[in-house]
Image: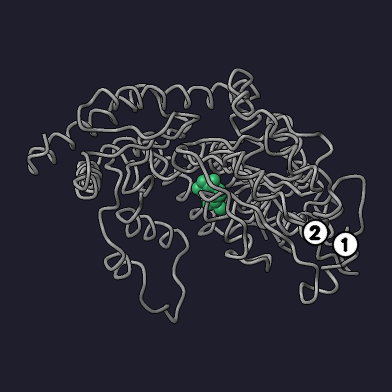
Amino acid sequence: MGLSKGETAAIMRAVEHSISYRQNVSDQKILPKIDAAEATRLLGGTLNEMGQDAAAVIDTIVADGDAGLMHFVSPRFFGYVVGASHPVGLAADILCSAWGQNSAYAAATPTSVVMENAVCTWVIDLLGLPSECGVGIVTGATLGNTAAVMAARNALLRRSNWDVEAQGLFGAPEIQVVIGAEAHSATAAALRYAGLGAERVHRVRTDDQGRMRTDDFRETIKDLNGPILVILQAGHINSGGYDPFAEIIPIARKKQAWVHVDGAFGLWVNAVPELSHRLTGVEDADSWAVDLHKWLNAPYDAGMVITRDREPLVTAMSAKAAYLPGAGAVQDMGDTVPELSRRARGIPSYAILKTMGKRGVREMVARHCELAQWVAAELSNIPGLTVLNDVACNQVAFHCGAGAARDVLTPAVLDAIHQEGLVYPSHGDWRGGPIIRVSVIGHQTSKADVEVLVASIKRAWAKVAAENNAV
Ligand SMILES: Cc1ncc(COP(=O)(O)O)c(C=O)c1O
């Protein structure tokens, strides 16, 4: 029957509102204008007994929802490590919902599964990973890490003649997990989800950039026996630093360990030939997790699990039942992800990659790294501010003031920056106290935007320092 007049109007209104939002977002203050209590008053409440006109619902969502939006997609959003939802990804995301594909099996939906497979092939090529890898497009790096840890668990225990998929973990040989002391919390979550325990790990000491120390790794792994999982990091959340893959992976290999790399954002630097020496050896791991919604700027939510050997990933993930279509010429996305039903979340990335091309992606990543260097250099020239990291990619971490005053001044400066509303760096805690963290990652973010950032930081620091007699 197609679309009713009201449904057509609803879709048109959503597109119009989307365009208007994107056209105006760069002029907006970044922070939401209302809090969750006010948003609850506007958007919560009880469900009407009777339905409403579809287009009116869309208009009301926008009218009531607008004030509570954080403008993550602004080119001046520098918080966390958050991509800015590329407009062509947004456009393709509309198609994705319009098509409503359950993108698990190519026999049922050749278009979406083939497009998602293309994304997998293109991304592993860009990242310099082996072409025969198994890949699944999941919701993000947390799930990417989880799926990889489950694949590792499968492979390591199979080598010990234990079928974990059938028998579970009770009575299984113990897997020893070796991880950096400053690994991202998402890897701890992955270990919990996989039943390996977040605390039952051997923590390797890190250097002043949060990178695993090779001497301590060697010492830690020396006496370990049985199945070993080593988790490394490509892109420390605060410093952007890389674990020394070329030193650690060969040592891990001698112990037949499975090496996994959490590369949520930092792995993208391997796409830039002039910068890839920072990650030398990363391609020798057994598995990787990387986000599409971070540095590729895909709309939420999309990330990847990548395994050198596809088989343990499929054995760990596939929920294939008798009624599902069998394997065909194309690798089924449903076999490498935990969901049985799933949206075609790779389609926006397909459109972004096609639009930017390899060169566009490389240039964007290189530009962000260069802008981060510039920000660090500028901040280092401001008396009273201390940049804590050697900029390894797109992250800059700094604090304000010295000694105990840092604990008060740094959050106060961040608050002043947020209240001014022109830019949004975010908070963190690193190297003994609070920090302000800048992530240069939005696809539109330019020199002009980082200039606004530095000027806002300068103003906030001058104000807070004067109020606290800190200079
Ligand atoms: C290093 C690292 N790993 C994992 C994650 C988790 O990624 P996601 O939020 O996409 O699940 C993040 C998020 O910032 C990260 O920086």
Q: Where is 329 relative to 121, above or below?
A: below
Quadrant the N terminus occupies? bottom right
Question: CB at mark 2 closer than 8 A to ligand 1?
Answer: no
In the figure, residue 238 lies in which quadrant?
top left
Q: Where is 146 relative to 208, above or below?
A: below
Residue 278 vs residue 288, the one in the foreground: 278
Q: CA distance from mark 1 to mark 2?
A: 8 Å
Kind of residue indicated by mark 2: Gly
Residue 59 is situated, as x and y percent measured from the top left of the image, at: 39, 56
Regarding residue 92, the answer to whether it shows in the image is no
Q: Is residue 255 left or right of residue 438?
A: right
Secondary structure of the residue carrying numbered label 1: loop
Quadrant the C terminus occupies? top left
Q: Which residue is mark 2?
A: 226
Residue 392 vs residue 359, the one in the foreground: 392
- Is the residue marked by circle 2 packed among few (<14), some (14-19), or many (20+) residues within 10 Å? some
Question: CB at mark 1 closer than 8 A to ligand 1?
Answer: no
Instruction: Give me the disc on residue 277.
Output: none
Q: Are marks 1 and 2 in contact (CB under 8 Å)?
A: yes
Residue 328 is situated, as x and y percent measured from the top left of the image, at: 92, 50
- Going from N to C along the chain, the mark reached first, 1 or 2, is 1
Q: Which residue is mark 1?
A: 160
Q: Farthest residue toward the top?
A: 274
Q: Is residue 206 left or right of residue 76?
A: right
Residue 9 vs residue 372, the one in the foreground: 372
Residue drawn at the location 60% of the way across and 44% of the way down: 216
Kind of residue indicated by mark 1: Ser
Residue 201 vs residue 157, the one in the foreground: 201
- Is the residue marked by circle 1 packed among few (<14), some (14-19), or many (20+) residues within 10 Å? few
Residue 411 is situated, as x and y percent measured from the top left of the image, at: 24, 48
In the figure, residue 52 lies in which quadrant?
bottom left
Residue drawn at the location 41% of the way across and 27% of the way down: 372
